[in-house]
Amino acid sequence: MFNTVQIITSSEKNRLVLANIFKNLGADAVFSLDLNDTLSIFEKVRPKAVFLVDSEDPPSEIKLRELKRIAPFLPLVVLLKNRDASRAVALMKLGAFDCVQSPWTEEELRPVYKKTLNLDGTPLVIDGEALEKKKNALVISGILAALAVGMAAGWFFASREYNRPQPPPAEIRLPYSHPTGIAPEGDSLVISDWYTQALYTHNASDFSIKSVASLPEETPAGLTASPDALWLQTASGVIEKRLKTAGLKLLAKIKTDRADIAGICHDGLYFWIAYNNNTLSKCLPNDSLTELDRYPYPGKKIAAFACDTRFLWAADPGLKALVKMPLGRPDTLLSSSEIKQYSRKSLKITGLASKNGKIWFTAEDNGTGLVFSENEPK
């Protein structure tokens, strides 16, 4: 069936919980006790996706490796027993399609389940006899080696005939669902996520994850960068200044006494805070963020906020546009450029950044974290 999923867990309690959740999602769930059990019924079930519970024998790393050998395009989702962003990133680097943090709920699993159904790829299927022989690693290695040689040859000749550069995707799906801010850093992009309470550093060219920094005591609601530091906006309204090092050493913790912050940014000289009441605050970037002036926002509503050395920027859902303002006159609307993604009613822009003539956005859409960019409007 098109909605069949296979679930690997040896725990009766987990089976009962997950059976109820997937039943409510409209999925036909088939359970396996372990990897061998999974392989023995894999051909008969032909699942749309496999969900495997972490911290059971054999380890998830082995399950991912073996299942990837048989069905390299099949979505493999790991159900984590503990909230651990570093663990999730490590498993996704090994081939996991996504990771679901604990506790598992219908609300958390629904967007991931829907994403697996929407995949265009078709799993590579090996017949039942071959699956039985899967226990012999040498046989499988030989099969895969032959496939690899054939595919490599095909790719080689096809590339000679049709070697055309492919444009980058207009939108990139993130391996986490709740991004809140974005900050360009050299050849990287740092993105904050409130649910996993972490900062993810991506390679700007292919968006692979370079590193992840967990912040278990904070809920990041926004992010910006200055030449010497990362500035983190928390859900409680506290703004933190941290070193750009692996440990993100805390330099200052500034209480604003306001939780209605729409965004923060650093223009290279001054620090700016945008509030949900359409107020823009210009501050000194010191340990108390001394306010110098305050301006009315010239648009309708601020969803995300950014600045560079020339302009202030705001994603405005009221205007469905990117608003551009001069640093010297923030209460003046220089231009309003349509953001096409706002045509999707379910999309919510959550982060904004400007660097080198490019505007970066983070967003949520039906439980999916997204990042996209466009050239700076004139």
Image (cartoon, rainbow, N blue to C red):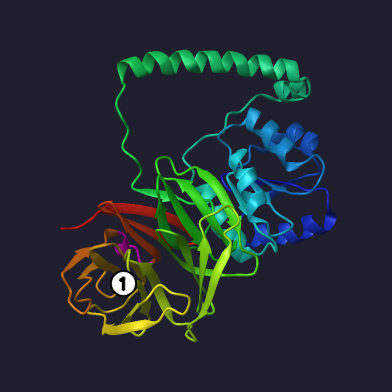
The x, y position of residue 346, in whole percent, is 40, 66
Up/down of 53 relative to 162, above or below = below
Q: Position of residue 137 (x, y in %)?
A: 75, 20
User: Which residue has dot 1 on it?
Assistant: 317
**Which corner quadrant holds the N terminus?**
top right
Q: Residue at x 54, y 79 (%)?
A: 236
The answer to whether residue 25 is visible is: no
Image coordinates for residue 109, horizontal then vertical, percent: 61, 59
Please give left or right for residue 267 compared with residue 365 in the image. Answer: left
Q: Which residues are magenta?
A: 341-345
Relative horizontal placement of residue 328, taking residue 232 as reference (left or right): left
In percent of the image, x 63 and y 37: which residue is there? 46
Q: Secondary structure at mark 1?
A: loop
Image quadrant in which you'd find residue 106: bottom right
* Amino acid bearing label 1: Pro
Verify whether residue 343 appears in magenta.
yes
